[in-house]
Image: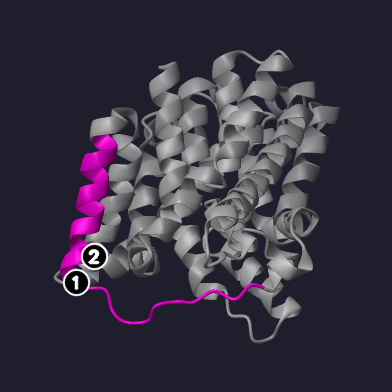
Amino acid sequence: METLFSGLLAFGVKQVIMILVGLVLIWLAIRHKYEPTLLLPIGFGTILANIPFSAAIGEHGPLSILFKAGIDTELFPLLIFVAIGAMIDFSPLLKNPFMLLFGAAAQFGIFVTIVLAAMMGFPIKEAASIGIIGAADGPTSIYVANRFAPNLLGPISVAAYSYMALVPIIQPPVIRLLTTKKERLIHMDYHSGDVPQVVKILFPIAITIISGIFVPASLALIGFLMFGNLIRESGVLESLSRTAQNELGNLITILLGITIASKMQGELFLVPQTLLILALGLVAFIFDTAGGVLFAKLLNVFRKQKINPMIGACGISAFPMSARVIHQMGQKEDPFNFLLMPAVSVNVGGQIGSVIAGGIILALLT
């Protein structure tokens, strides 16, 4: 009888709180559809990891084994990048390569947050892992955090995916604060027409080579992303492209989410640092949004053909959610203002920019 009820008797306050956290994540995923593909597995895994004497964790626990096989080896985040690359169409960016600059400008919040975290007492590698939340790119955040701050992987992952889901809530107030109505009403031209297939094929190859030469530490991240895109654009691997987008992406996403939860144990998560990480992650998102918008406003000082500053906010990597948010904001200001394609151009550039930013941080601190 004692063995039967040993788990119940061993429950502590932290375990109860973390199980409630897991239930909240599941509720957000199902009820509000906030990043359900990640938050639901993370929420359920959190429950598994916090039941006393759980066979799911520990030396022979399946979550721990999956963590060692998929996260410690960095395999799961890289395979996710193959799937993401296969999903992305870079055509809007290729029609206007200038938009790639916004993908760089919108990483401003990452480096602001690193400085703030370091000033608050976090070691520089932990500060860098927190700052990368601003990339709005879950796999990149996991990749960097696992390399530099595995003890913070749980809160960093939750913050990264939670704030990605909250982009429609976080970005609009920041954008409205930094822009005038006149600026938000600016219309932008979009050049229609197809991009030659040879350009689509050469683009992922060229980005991989250039990034590898200048930022070798980014090569695994950008290389797997561009490999996935090359599968998509080659025209000879349609079945593999569909598999990467669907079966591979779905399977690894499930494994990634539930595996991360092995680091969501109460002893690791319920510490004062967690609240600071969540707050700093929000700061990173806000400054990333502000950086992109202010960069567009700066360019408008010198350009005759003005840019709608709102699209600068799409330089974060929350694809395609951020582009949709900006398009909807433009429609509210003027129903005839169609910003979707310029916003998508910036958004896919942000995907590249966030990965390169992660590589730069790895290069500087490794």
Q: Which mark is residue 71?
A: none
Residue 193 covered by magenta stretch: yes
Does residue 7 lie above or below 317 as drawn?
above
Does residue 87 lie above or below 165 as drawn?
below
Task: Left or right? Give the position of 100 relative to 272.
Answer: left
Tell me where the magenta segment starts and ends, as one range.
186-212
Quarter holding residue 324: bottom right
Task: Left or right? Give the position of 97 relative to 292.
Answer: left
Can you identify the residue that label 1 sits on? Answer: 197
Which residue type carries mark 2? Lys
Which residue type carries mark 1? Gln
Residue at point 36% right, 30% down? 73
Quarter holding residue 94: bottom left
- The secondary structure type at the circle numbered 2 is helix
Residue 341, horizontal then vertical, whole percent: 49, 73
Q: Are marks 1 and 2 in contact (CB under 8 Å)?
A: yes
Q: Check disc 1: other Cα within 10 Å, few if <14, some if 14-19, many if 20+.
A: few
In the foreground, 294 or 90: 294
Q: Check disc 2: other Cα within 10 Å, few if <14, some if 14-19, many if 20+.
A: some
Measure the C-alpha gap from mark 1 to mark 2.
5 Å
Task: Left or right? Give the position of 352 relative to 32.
Answer: left
Can you identify the residue that label 2 sits on? Answer: 200
Residue 117, horizontal then vertical, whole percent: 68, 22
